Amino acid sequence: MGYSLDFGWLADATGAITRGAATTVLLIAVTTLAGTFLSILGAAGRRNGPLLLKRAIGVYVEIIRNTPFLVQLFFIFFGLPSIGIRFDPLLAAMLAMTLNMAAYTTEIVGAGLDAVPRGQTEAALALGLRPRQVFVKIVLPQALKVIYPALTSQIIIMMLESAVVSQIAVRELTYEADMLQARTFRAFETYFVVTIVYLVLSMGLRRLLVSGGRRALGAGVS
Amino acid sequence: MIEFTFWDIVRNLLLAARWTVLLSLAAFVGGGVVGMVVLFLRIAKNKWARRLASGYIALFQGTPLLMQLFLMFFGLPMLGLRIEPWTAAALGLTFFASAYLAEIWRGGVDALPRGQWDAGASLGLHYLQELRLIILPQAFSITRAPTVGFLVQLIKSTALTSIIGFEELVRTSNAINNATFEPFTVYGLVALIFFVMCFPLTQYARSLGTTGD
């Protein structure tokens, strides 16, 4: 066994790793905002929309939840152009991640909406608020508070899953790692370092979300 | 160039799906066995054993599965083991599954009332007997839904092993797509095959109570 670990390449690689990590953070930031917004619409539509919309949302959720993210990504990036819908890699990745996350968070947000007592809606209506105001100002904030921990976990799972978008040449953290190891021939060390970076990102993201959530939603958020 | 009819595509994908099923089963069984060991450490009386198991779980739940597979694929040869994609895939997914299953089952153990342990002790059972006869059967039974939910997640996760070169459903579909230039049909069919495998399990998990993935 003559193999010895060598991290000498690391000094020249910090730029690439930082750039990759920044792209990963950008991806998850966009996905979190767009995915949460979409899932609020989805959950509300699934409860109050017309029958056809309810069905469509149900089908969408089941399809996404029961197929691998990698296949969804390939379908969007490679499959859709053959019917004339074309995205560049970054956009395809953002779309795939958003659609994937929204399917999971639609269920989560829905559970939160169900957890808000009916009396809250009735009281707000009795005070003369319009139905949309009732939803946005009364029901939704309470629901978000209930589901915030579950939402946080889902965001972190999505961040880890985003490693896969390197497969369509989005220049995020894993893609940079692939490039680095092809150049340095130090595959294990490269992926080891990048794995640590992911670990730091996921722990940092969790901490940020928990403290941010506490500030925005008040006490009682864990 | 070889001509592929629609049925050729379907046939080849279904043949490749056998490997997806096999890998899922191997990882689920292997992950269950290793997960039991991690569970024992996680609920042990020794503080350091518990810390070790928490660290193990946090490590696998805090890093991308793709990185775990890469480290397995490139790391094991450094220990002098000749490794095929199949071995790296099965081992990587086994460790991945063990961390998640241990955490799910620990939730079940924690959910049991303290009195169950006390009752076992008062009957004169020692620690392992308590676990085997009283605690674990109940913990498994109340965590059946999230366990099945995780199996769904595991089946979907096998798709990543295509990236380290294991010839399962997705890798085969990439090859077929390169030969046929029909990505819409090919990846649509792959999604359908995964759906057919996962949806019944999802429904089963749902029928057991709270969904767990």
Image (tube, rainbow, N blue to C red):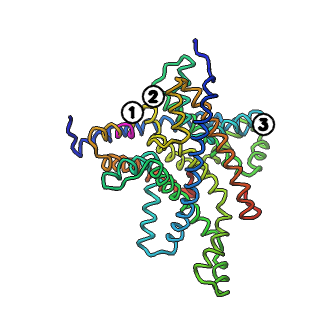
Q: For residue B171: magenta? A: yes
Disc 3 element: loop
Q: Which mark is residue B85?
A: 2
Whether residue B127 is visible: yes
Q: Main secondary structure of the magenta part?
A: helix
- In the visual, does B74 lie left or right of A123? left
Q: Residues within 10 Å of mark 3 (few under 14, many from 20)?
A: few
Q: Is residue A98 magenta?
A: no
- Which callout, 1 or 2, points at the residue further toward the start of the chain? 2
Kindly state the secondary structure of the residue where label 1 is placed: loop
Q: Image point 56% across, 47% down: which residue?
A: B147
Q: CA distance from mark 3 to mark 1?
A: 43 Å
- Residue range in magenta is B169-173
Decide which of tag 3 and tag 1 comes sooner along the chain.
Answer: 3
**What's the amino acid at mark 2?**
Pro
Which comes sooner in the sequence, label 3 or label 2? 3
C-beta proximity under 8 Å, tags 3 and 2? no
Q: CA distance from mark 3 to mark 2?
A: 38 Å
Task: Judge if badges 3 and 2 mark residues of a common chain.
Answer: yes
Alpha-carbon span between mark 1 and mark 2: 8 Å
Residue on which the image places disc 3: B45
The amino acid type of the residue labelled 1 equals Glu
Residue A50, image quadrant: bottom left
Chain of the residue displaying label 1 = B
Please, what secondary structure does the residue beneath circle 2 have? Answer: helix
